[in-house]
Image (tube, rainbow, N blue to C red):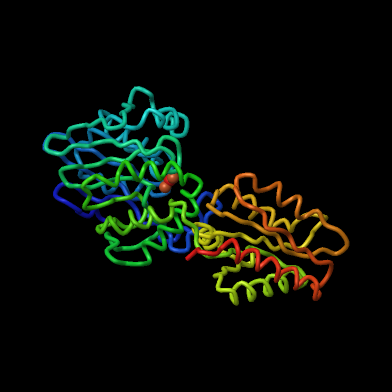
């Protein structure tokens, strides 16, 4: 892919990874991704903002072939999908300085073996002049590593926030425009990667929202040319507001837990409560994470395996705990053959979830009338707790 001009002497570079289907050997990428870098040429100096994943280094180096001089390479984030090609760029431009936040310095040395004397750290609010263009650095820690920062280009009113506001989306569209799917992809990205850092992101949003911004140019996915759309979406996702939604991740081995979950789904729907049910044997984890962005309640459904929850439930519950969604309530439903410690074990897996536990309904064998009645009572409790939620 050739470079693309987004403003006078501001270019998009980078690579579109159409075929990648997994990130960090964990996160599904149904739509691929992109690694966006940007070249800003002032009247005196030139800066490259970020690089690309090591697997796409050759693409970036080909794009830079006719660029005679790069004076600064800005690393907003030390993770390899943006900094992986930085060593090659520094070799190509031996006089270039690598610019990063103070916290990024050690990370770049440790992860990429960059020589310390190539690195210049910048403080929050510091600027570097390129002549008639200025790079202003804004520290935005914990989106989603401790060292992350953004660059603001005031002359062109562009914010380059790296992962922040990004989306894993391979597309030939340079701009998001009004495409609703970009916001959905950005929500998936937020859910999978940013959600554990909701509080720091609230602070970072405050730092950038008053800037005069025409474009938000992230390092994954298309450029936001209507910045209010993604800023409003982020404000909603990181807010303390929860929705009238129950998320039910579950698995069933012989149909008992499935019968419990199906009964619960019907009861909740009858009472005007939205439900998203996820059979973990077939679930896209990204979809589950997206549902957890807004949900008020989680109900975990599991059969008993070797006295505890099904191993898949074990794994997904640990993941939900790590994502720290803003859930308010939790419950457990499921089944067992002759005995179970599933409730105690699941409870021990969710210390990060600051939830009120509304109860557990576990049946021996296939659910009977008493078990269904207990699910009805659980539904009434959830309805009480959801009163007033939209
Ligand atoms: Fe896109 Fe955190 O790297």
Residue 11 point in image, percent of width and height: 22, 49
Q: Is residue 79 above or below residue 168?
A: above
Q: Is residue 89 left or right of residue 68?
A: right
Residue 140 point in image, percent of width and height: 37, 39
Residue 229 point in image, percent of width and height: 31, 59
Q: Nearer the viewer, residue 196 or 305?
A: 196
Q: Residue at x 30, y 29 (%)?
A: 122
Say which quadrant the N terminus sits in: bottom left
Q: Nearer the viewer, residue 368 or 253?
A: 368
Q: Is residue 177 above or below residue 323?
A: below
Q: Is residue 109 visible?
A: yes
Q: Is residue 1 visible?
A: no
Which image quadrant for residue 264?
A: bottom right
Q: Residue furthest right?
A: 338
Q: Is residue 233 above or below residue 102?
A: below
Q: Residue at x 38, y 28 (%)?
A: 102
Q: Is residue 28 above or below residue 363?
A: above
Q: Residue at x 75, y 54 (%)?
A: 343
- Exactly how many numbered labels are in the figure? 0
Q: Is residue 317 left or right of residue 98?
A: right
Q: Is residue 177 left or right of residue 354?
A: left
Which image quadrant for residue 272?
A: bottom right
Residue 78 point in image, percent of width and height: 41, 37
């Amino acid at each position: 892919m050739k470079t693309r001009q987004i403003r006078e002497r501001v270019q998009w570079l980078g690579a579109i990874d159409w075929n990648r289907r997994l990130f960090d050997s964990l996160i599904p990428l149904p739509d691929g991704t992109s690694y966006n870098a940007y070249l800003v040429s002032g009247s005196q100096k030139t800066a490259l903002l970020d690089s690309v994943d090591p697997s796409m280094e050759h693409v970036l180096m080909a794009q830079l072939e006719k660029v005679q001089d790069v004076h600064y390479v800005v690393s907003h984030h030390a993770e390899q999908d943006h900094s992986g090609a930085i060593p090659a760029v520094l070799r190509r431009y031996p006089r270039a300085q690598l610019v990063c936040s103070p916290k990024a310095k050690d990370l770049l040395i440790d992860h990429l073996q960059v020589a310390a004397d190539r690195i210049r750290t910048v403080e929050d609010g510091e600027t570097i002049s390129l002549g008639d263009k200025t790079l202003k650095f804004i520290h935005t820690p914990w989106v989603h590593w401790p060292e992350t920062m953004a660059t603001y280009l005031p002359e062109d009113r562009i914010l380059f926030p790296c992962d922040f506001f990004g989306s894993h989306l391979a597309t030939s569209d340079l701009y998001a425009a009004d495409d609703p799917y970009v916001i959905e992809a950005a929500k998936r990205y937020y859910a999978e990667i940013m959600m554990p850092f909701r509080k720091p992101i609230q602070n970072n949003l405050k730092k950038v929202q008053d800037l005069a911004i025409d474009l938000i140019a992230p390092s994954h996915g298309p450029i936001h040319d209507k910045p209010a759309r993604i800023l409003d979406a982020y404000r909603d996702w990181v807010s303390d507001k929860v929705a009238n939604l129950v998320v039910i991740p579950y698995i069933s081995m012989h149909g008992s837990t499935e019968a419990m979950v199906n009964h619960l789904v019907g009861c909740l729907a009858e009472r005007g409560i939205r439900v998203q049910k996820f059979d973990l044997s077939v679930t896209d984890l990204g979809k589950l994470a997206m549902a957890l962005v807004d949900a008020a309640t989680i109900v975990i459904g599991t059969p008993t395996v070797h006295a505890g929850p099904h191993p898949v439930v074990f794994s997904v519950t640990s993941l939900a705990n790590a994502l720290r969604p803003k859930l308010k309530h939790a419950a457990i439903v499921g089944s067992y053959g002759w005995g179970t410690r599933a409730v105690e074990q699941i409870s021990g897996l969710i210390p990060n979830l600051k939830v009120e536990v509304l109860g557990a309904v576990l049946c021996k064998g296939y659910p009977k009338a008493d078990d269904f009645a207990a699910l009805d009572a659980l539904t009434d409790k959830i309805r009480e707790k959801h009163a007033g939620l939209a």
